[in-house]
Image: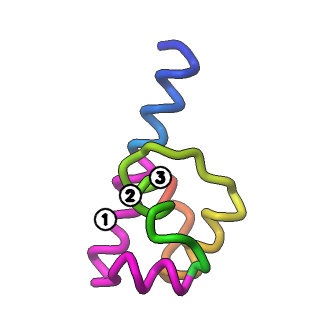
Amino acid sequence: MNDVHEIQAQLKIFGANLRRARMVRKITLESLAERANLNIRTLQKFEMGQSNVLITTVLRLRHGLGCSWDELLG
């Protein structure tokens, strides 16, 4: 697998983990956007695996969801 495909696969996994964590906690996109100080469209792109995410943004999402690193990145 080349690097581009591997990155795309990891972004999809992150997106699925993010959505699952949000849904388990019954948090809307709007609420998470407010908690993490992010745009709703940006969150949608993350959940669909269509956008790169900075580690600092993962930290904001983690705090907004009240979840572990492993839950988002595992």
Residue that protrudes farthest toward the top in the picture: 2
Q: Is residue 71 visible?
A: no
3D distance between C-alphas at marks 1 and 2: 5 Å
Magenta part mainly helix, strand or loop?
helix
- Please indicate whether residue 59 sits to the left or right of residue 21 in the image: right
Residue 38 within the segment the image draws in magenta: no
Q: Amino acid at mark 3?
A: Gly
Residue at position x 51%, y 54% in the image? 73
The first of marks 3 and 2 along the sequence is: 2
Image marks 3 and 2: residues in contact by CB distance under 8 Å: yes
Q: Which residue is mark 1?
A: 20
* Mark 1 / mark 3, whichever is N-terminal: 1
Which residue carries the number 3 mark?
74
Outermost residue toward the right?
Answer: 56
Determine which of the numbered discs, if any, sits on residue 17 in the image: 2
SS for dot 3: loop
The residue under the point 34% across, 53% down is: 16
Task: Please provide percent x and percent y for residue 52.
Answer: 58, 45
Which numbered tag is attached to residue 70? none
* Magenta span of residues: 13-35
